[in-house]
Image (cartoon, rainbow, N blue to C red):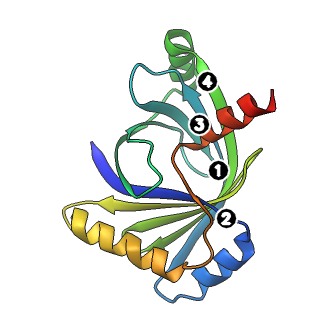
Amino acid sequence: MMQNIEIKYRIADPERVAQRLTSIREIKVQFRHYQKDIYFDAPEGRWKIRLEENSRPFLIRYYRPDEDKPRISDYTLTPLPDLKETYADLKTNYGVLAEVEKIRELYLYKNVRIHLDEVTGLGWFLELESVISERYDRQVSQQHLQEVLGILGGLLDEAERGSYLDLLRSQQYLAG
């Protein structure tokens, strides 16, 4: 199982955030893609199939607390050689909770994945994932995450506790 330290923020001005990110030489733009996550009612943690432009599908399973501060996430990425079969099995065994669609811009700073996301029905978010590895232990990963937060000071709104699925379901509940 892999680990990262992650946090998500709402943002009001994605253009200013993108400008700030691209103004820093050490931050590299990777791509801008459409993504669709299909969430399942898994027995524990969160399970989703990720469909993404120019990439093969993956099953992503992750486990983390819902907190509005940087938190450890344990996760696995499993390539799906047969998407239709895996989708049918997961749908039959667990049921589909929701589908979340977004346009994601990915930036990299050291071991920090910076996601600038426009999520259908929710708006704009910035999600940071500082990947923990042999090269970058938990302390260094936390330091790199704080460096990115320092770069983006003043551009981030409130931190979010949950996943996009949680936010979408909460919004649907409030709407009626």
Marks 4 and 1 sit apart, C-alpha to C-alpha, by 22 Å
Q: Nearer the viewer, mark 2 or mark 1?
A: 2
Quarter-of-image position of residue 31: bottom right
User: Reading the chain from its start, which is encountered first: label 2 or label 1?
Assistant: 2
- Could you tell me which secondary element the residue under label 3 belongs to? helix
User: In the rendered structure, which amino acid carries the disc numbered 3?
Assistant: Asp
Judging by the rendered image, the residue that carries numbered circle 2 is: 11
Marks 2 and 1 sit apart, C-alpha to C-alpha, by 24 Å
Judging by the rendered image, the residue that carries numbered circle 1 is: 53
Q: Residue furthest top?
A: 92
Please report contact status of discs 4 and 3: CB closer than 8 Å, yes or no.
Answer: no
Q: Position of residue 12 (x, y in %)?
A: 73, 66
User: In the rendered structure, which amino acid carries the disc numbered 1?
Assistant: Glu
User: In the rendered structure, which amino acid carries the disc numbered 4?
Assistant: Leu
Please report contact status of discs 4 and 1: CB closer than 8 Å, yes or no.
Answer: no
**Mark linked to residue 97:** 4
Quarter-of-image position of residue 163: top right
**Mark linked to residue 166:** 3
Marks 2 and 4 sit apart, C-alpha to C-alpha, by 26 Å
Q: Position of residue 95 (x, y in %)?
A: 57, 15
- Could you tell me which secondary element the residue under label 1 belongs to? loop
Q: Position of residue 112 (x, y in %)?
A: 41, 68
Please report contact status of discs 2 and 1: CB closer than 8 Å, yes or no.
Answer: no
- Could you tell me which secondary element the residue under label 4 belongs to? strand
User: Reading the chain from its start, which is encountered first: label 2 or label 4?
Assistant: 2
User: In the rendered structure, which amino acid carries the disc numbered 2?
Assistant: Ile
Relative vertical location of residue 14 with respect to residue 89 in this rendering, above or below? below
